[in-house]
């Protein structure tokens, strides 16, 4: 009887201690300076300030420089002015073809028989003949490298049944992407018979971003300088001369007509940052390439992407009061990379906010703390720290059983 009373008194004491210990939720914080990680996350947060006083030397009616991952416009002149895009139009054609390939609707190996409509297209072409058979890959290559109007038209017909139906799909996609100042009349960019085939530098950047962000395989065509078709009989030379010499170039598309002037959408990547430079309405080919190069050079010189990282061992298992388990493991979030201005001298720091303990019951996935990323004094991103499992509240019988096992 005395032993039972002693155990009971001890149990009550332990339970009372459990109820009072750690009753105060003390906030714990660790501050860690960021380090540059070789692995850049897919999600990138824009924290870069853009100066309104910058003037880049360009020779065009309209230009835009955009960072691909965030969609941030780093520089722009007349970016919303409606202009003729010439063959830069083909970015939308290529985008829809890539979507069809990735979704399984068509395959690169599919063979297509050339129609009279496609064979009749003028301008830049690979001289397709009615009844000639080519694969999707060959036509895509001709469109990306040589800007072939006949190949481009045949791809559109294959996807939608006719060029007219395909153009309807192009305009639908433009609307989905927020290209509010764009209207396509054809899939090639030929503008000698139209007054309404118009877009803007900003809208072109939007569709280029969609293509390059989601269809990386297209770079195996957009970065090729020279290739051939028909067993070497038809030579393809890329209309984008930046492919030959610009460091990090990834594409994308040129265009030239009398109405449009000389145009280009150039994309390039360095140190995990990809930029999109759009130039519309240059007087000559050299001016468009110089303008695109100047935009890209300025972007790479003034912006960078950094990956904040911290030692996850600094975040310990969290104590649980009144729980069947004494501790609960935590799920540490992955941090997004940051687009920052190189001229911003503020330090990037990481602050971890966690209590000393939590009260049972605890649900799995419960938010118990925060990881905050600071640029200087400003919080630029924050993430939840959550529990990896559930912990039930301890009851009298569980506590009694644990006490008995101690003897």
Image: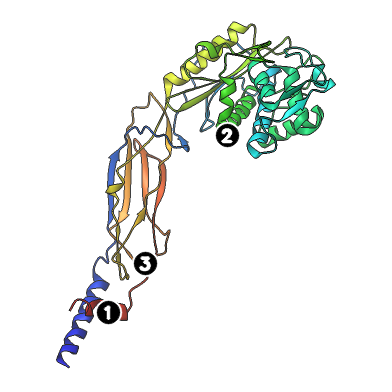
Judged from the image, the secondary structure of the residue bearing numbered disc 1 is: helix
On the image, which quarter does residue 307 sit in? Answer: top left
| Location of mark 1 (residue) | 401
Q: Nearer the viewer, residue 388 or 174?
A: 388
* Residue at 43% in and 58% down: 365
Judged from the image, the secondary structure of the residue bearing numbered disc 3 is: loop
Horizontal relation, residue 403 to residue 391: left or right? left
N-term-proximal mark, 3 vs 2? 2
* Residue at 50% in and 11% down: 245
Q: Please, is residue 365 above or below residue 221 in the view?
A: below
Q: Please, is residue 251 above or below residue 367 in the view?
A: above
Measure the C-alpha gap from mark 1 to mark 2.
Answer: 57 Å
- As drawn, the residue found furthest toward the front would be 231
Measure the C-alpha gap from mark 1 to mark 3.
Answer: 17 Å
Residue 73 at what x, y percent from top left?
A: 54, 27
- As drawn, the residue found furthest toward the bottom would be 1
On the image, which quarter does residue 37 sit in? Answer: top left
């Amino acid at each position: 009887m005395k032993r039972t009373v002693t155990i009971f008194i001890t149990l009550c004491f332990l339970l009372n201690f459990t109820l009072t210990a750690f009753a105060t939720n003390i906030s714990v914080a660790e501050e860690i300076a960021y380090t540059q990680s070789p692995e850049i996350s897919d999600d990138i947060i824009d924290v870069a300030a853009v100066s309104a006083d910058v003037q880049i030397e360009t020779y065009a009616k309209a230009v835009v420089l955009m960072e691909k991952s965030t969609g941030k416009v780093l520089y722009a002149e007349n970016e919303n002015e409606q202009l003729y895009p010439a063959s830069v139009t083909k970015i939308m054609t290529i985008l829809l073809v890539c979507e069809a390939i990735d979704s399984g609707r068509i395959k690169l190996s599919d063979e297509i028989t050339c129609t009279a409509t496609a064979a009749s297209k003028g301008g830049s072409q690979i001289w397709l003949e009615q009844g000639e058979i080519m694969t999707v890959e060959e036509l895509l290559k001709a469109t990306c490298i040589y800007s072939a109007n006949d190949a481009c038209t045949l791809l559109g017909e294959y996807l939608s049944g006719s060029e007219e139906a395909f153009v309807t799909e192009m305009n639908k996609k433009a609307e989905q992407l927020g290209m509010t100042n764009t209207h396509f009349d054809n899939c090639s960019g030929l503008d000698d018979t139209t007054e309404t085939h118009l877009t803007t530098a900003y809208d072109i950047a939007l569709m280029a971003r969609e293509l390059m962000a989601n269809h990386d395989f297209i770079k195996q065509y957009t970065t090729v300088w020279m290739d051939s078709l028909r067993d070497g009989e038809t030579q393809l030379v890329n209309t984008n001369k930046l492919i030959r010499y610009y460091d990090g170039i990834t594409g994308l598309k040129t265009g030239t007509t009398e109405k449009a002037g000389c145009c280009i959408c150039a994309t390039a990547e360095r140190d995990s940052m990809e930029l999109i430079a759009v130039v519309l309405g240059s007087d000559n080919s050299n001016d468009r390439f110089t303008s695109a190069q100047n935009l890209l050079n300025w972007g790479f010189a003034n912006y960078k992407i950094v990956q904040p990282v911290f030692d996850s061992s600094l975040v310990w298992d969290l104590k649980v009061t009144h729980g069947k388990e004494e501790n609960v493991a935590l799920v540490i979030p992955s941090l997004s990379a940051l687009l920052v201005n190189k001229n911003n001298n503020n330090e990037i720091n990481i602050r971890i906010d966690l209590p000393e303990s939590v009260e049972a019951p605890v649900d799995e996935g419960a938010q118990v703390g925060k990881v905050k990323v600071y640029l200087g004094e400003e919080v630029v991103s924050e993430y939840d720290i959550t529990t990896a499992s559930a912990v039930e509240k301890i009851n009298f019988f569980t506590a009694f059983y644990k006490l008995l096992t101690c003897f």
